[in-house]
Image (cartoon, rainbow, N blue to C red):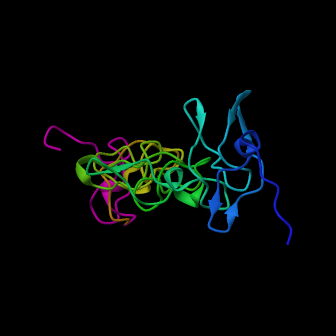
Amino acid sequence: MSRRKRLTPQELERLCSYATPMGRCPYARVTLVKDGARYGSRFCKAHCCKKIDGNSACLNMRTNNKGYCQHHLLCTGSINDQRCTNYIKNYDPKDFKFCSQYHNCLTPGCANERNHPNGVDYRYCPDHRCDHADCANPKAAPSPFCASHTCASPACLARCPGASGDLDDPSRYCDRHRVCAAGGCRRFAHLDDQG
């Protein structure tokens, strides 16, 4: 039987901190680089979390193949003043900070947090949600409103009260383009003092 060479304390200090009952990881610790600054990790390339917190490398071991620990895979949003326990969208804290279930905007490619006024989930961030009060629908580009709150007149992006989608519904048009409510009449209707 061959005996293993005993490592000196200095050699042990350079090795990865990951250990199991079978032994310690034999690989050297890595140094993470961010914006030209260097941060020493406790783990090797296979075991270290790639996130840098403040002025030091993360002290936790990675738990997924993208290179992040359990702590950095959790959503940074909060529910009832407690941190959300869902995982970050796509399990990638490099691109996202919020979970797709409750906190991340549903617009593809957007990493912003959704609106939750008074506990109501609007599903979209302020950049992608309709600007009409209490509407949870996405904006219909280039309008600041959703399709049902944007005037149906061609090239008009003004707000309208919103409608069900019927082409003859006068509420599909803004005040400037509102059509007559009489059946079959396509002339503009103008509002007076009584509405």
Residue 120 percent coordinates (x, y): 27, 55
**Relative horizontal placement of residue 2, taking residue 121 as reference (left or right):** right
Residue 72 percent coordinates (x, y): 53, 50
**Does the magenta-highlighted stretch encompass residue 9?**
no
**Relative horizontal placement of residue 102, taking residue 94 as reference (left or right):** left
Specify the farthest residue to the left: 194
Above or below, 39 against 16 in this view is: above
Residue 65 percent coordinates (x, y): 67, 61
For the C terminus, the quadrant is top left
Dominant secondary structure (helix, strand or loop) of the stretch shown in magenta: loop
Q: Residue at (67%, 48%) from the top-left corner? A: 43
**Does the magenta-highlighted stretch encompass residue 172?**
yes
For the N terminus, the quadrant is bottom right
Of residues 185 and 152, the one drawn nearer to the viewer in this rendering: 152
Of residues 173 and 91, the one drawn nearer to the viewer in this rendering: 91
Q: Residue at (53%, 58%) from the top-left corner? A: 89
Name which quarter of the figure residue 184 lies in. bottom left
Q: Which residues are magenta?
A: 166-195
Of residues 140 and 39, the one drawn nearer to the viewer in this rendering: 39
